[in-house]
């Protein structure tokens, strides 16, 4: 029996593949490589010393998806695959709805056809929209404010309806906060196309000299230093959360949402100072105007995941920055950087 990981060559997917292999699961990975590299799969195999069965396939292609289920005995699916840039989704909403929602529907139809009812879904804290209270708990109403977030919200609702129609389904909806960091080996990490959308990859590229300056969007928020505060979670902690969620769905039925966050926030300036300390590099920045829709403070209430999944984030800001810098320093061009490492133990 194997675990199918859709989008397994991506940032969070590849780190989760390591945790799955180290927990002795057999893996099948499906990825269309539109925003990822098969090199990440090779490096995961190097890190773990184990092999992954890989399919270059697209969830929108029903025949390609069916082939995976025909050729493998799938026990559960961890579903990462999807477009994920908030800003791009505003300009290309139809592409996001078509790709993320239609792809998930085809995946679920195929799972039902082959009698696979266990899923861990990669959702997002963006489903909460603009809340005026913190911490954010799973009981809050969900009201996403951009097309990307709405695809996650809609998929959550689709999966709830799916369980209501057939109680054989067992589904965990994992709402991520702000993933950062990289595997401590320095072999895999976040490899964005073009200019990064997220804070730490942007800081990393400034530190390594690829970008000249970081823009900070507002320093007049009601926070300790005026910059926005967010819940940053180390990607290895996040990946391990999927193992605990998988254990839950394999041993029960139903559908539940879980926040994966640390339960505390760091400001933009705190992240910059910590990264400067980790890298020994100066990070030049410029204060610019606030972005529309940004709020001062956002962080998770992770108590439900702690209680029901027996999971808790363990890594702090120091490890987040040190691991991000190690990845960036040794892979200045991401997965296009050549590595002579054949095996890491």
Image: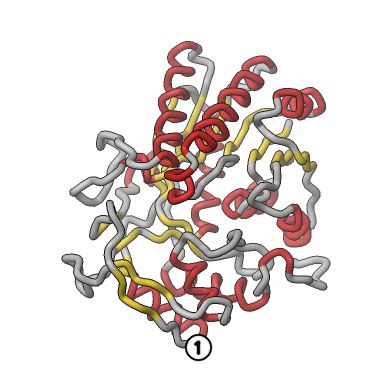
Establish if 16 lies above or below 147: below
Residue farthest to the front, as pictured: 91
- SS for dot 1: loop
Relative to 116, 284 lies left or right: left
- Residue 205 visible in rendering: yes
Q: How is the image coloured?
A: secondary structure
- Residue 85, position as x, y percentages in the image: 49, 50
Give the residue displayed 40% in from the left and 33% down from the top: 153
Q: Label 1, on which residue?
A: 280
- Neighbours of disc 1 within 10 Å: few (<14), some (14-19), many (20+): few
Relative to 71, 44 lies left or right: left
Q: In front here: 147 or 310?
A: 147
Residue farthest to the top, as pictured: 165
Establish if 329 lies above or below 13: below
Give the residue displayed 46% in from the left and 29% down from the top: 155
- Residue 330, position as x, y percentages in the image: 67, 76
Establish if 302 lies above or below 60: below
Residue farthest to the left, as pictured: 222
- Residue 120 visible in rendering: no
Relative to 88, 22 lies left or right: right
Q: Quadrant of the C terminus?
A: bottom right
Q: Quadrant of residue 178?
A: bottom left
- Residue 248, position as x, y percentages in the image: 50, 34
Q: How many marks?
A: 1
Q: Quadrant of residue 116?
A: top right
Give the residue displayed 66% in from the left and 32% down from the top: 59
Give the residue displayed 83% in from the left and 67% down from the top: 342
Establish if 6 lies above or below 279: above
Q: In front here: 222 or 26?
A: 222
Q: Quadrant of residue 337?
A: bottom right
Q: In front here: 274 or 169?
A: 274
- Residue 259, position as x, y percentages in the image: 38, 44
């Amino acid at each position: 029996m194997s675990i199918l990981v859709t989008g397994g060559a991506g940032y969070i997917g590849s780190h989760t593949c390591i945790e799955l292999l180290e927990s002795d699961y057999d893996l099948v990975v499906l990825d269309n490589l539109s925003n990822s590299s098969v090199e990440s799969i090779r490096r995961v195999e190097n890190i773990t010393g184990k092999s992954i069965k890989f399919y270059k396939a697209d969830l929108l292609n029903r025949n390609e998806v069916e082939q995976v289920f025909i050729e493998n005995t799938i026990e559960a699916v961890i579903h990462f695959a999807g477009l994920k840039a908030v800003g791009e989704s505003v300009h290309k909403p139809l592409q996001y709805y078509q790709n993320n929602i239609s792809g998930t529907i085809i995946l679920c139809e195929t799972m039902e056809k082959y009698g696979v009812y266990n899923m861990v879904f990669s959702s997002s804290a963006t489903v909460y929209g603009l809340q005026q209270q913190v911490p954010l708990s799973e009981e809050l109403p969900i009201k996403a404010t951009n097309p990307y977030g709405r695809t996650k919200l809609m998929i959550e609702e689709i999966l709830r309806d799916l369980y209501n129609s057939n109680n054989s389904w067992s589904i965990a909806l994992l709402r991520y906060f702000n993933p950062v960091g990289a595997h401590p080996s320095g072999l895999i990490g976040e490899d964005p196309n073009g200019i990064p959308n997220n804070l730490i990859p942007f800081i990393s590229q400034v530190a390594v000299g690829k970008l000249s300056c970081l823009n900070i969007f507002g320093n007049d928020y009601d926070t300790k230093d005026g910059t926005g505060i967010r819940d940053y979670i180390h990607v290895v902690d996040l990946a391990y959360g999927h193992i605990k969620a998988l254990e839950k769905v394999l041993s029960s039925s139903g559908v539940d949402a879980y926040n994966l966050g640390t339960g505390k926030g760091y400001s933009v300036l705190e992240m910059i100072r910590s990264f400067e300390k980790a890298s020994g590099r100066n990070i030049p920045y410029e204060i610019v105007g606030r972005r529309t829709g940004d709020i001062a403070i956002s962080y998770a209430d992770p108590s439900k995941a702690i209680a029901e999944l027996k999971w808790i984030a363990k890594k702090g800001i120091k490890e987040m920055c040190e691991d991000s810098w190690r990845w960036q320093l040794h892979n200045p061009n991401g997965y296009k950087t050549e590595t002579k490492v054949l095996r890491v133990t």
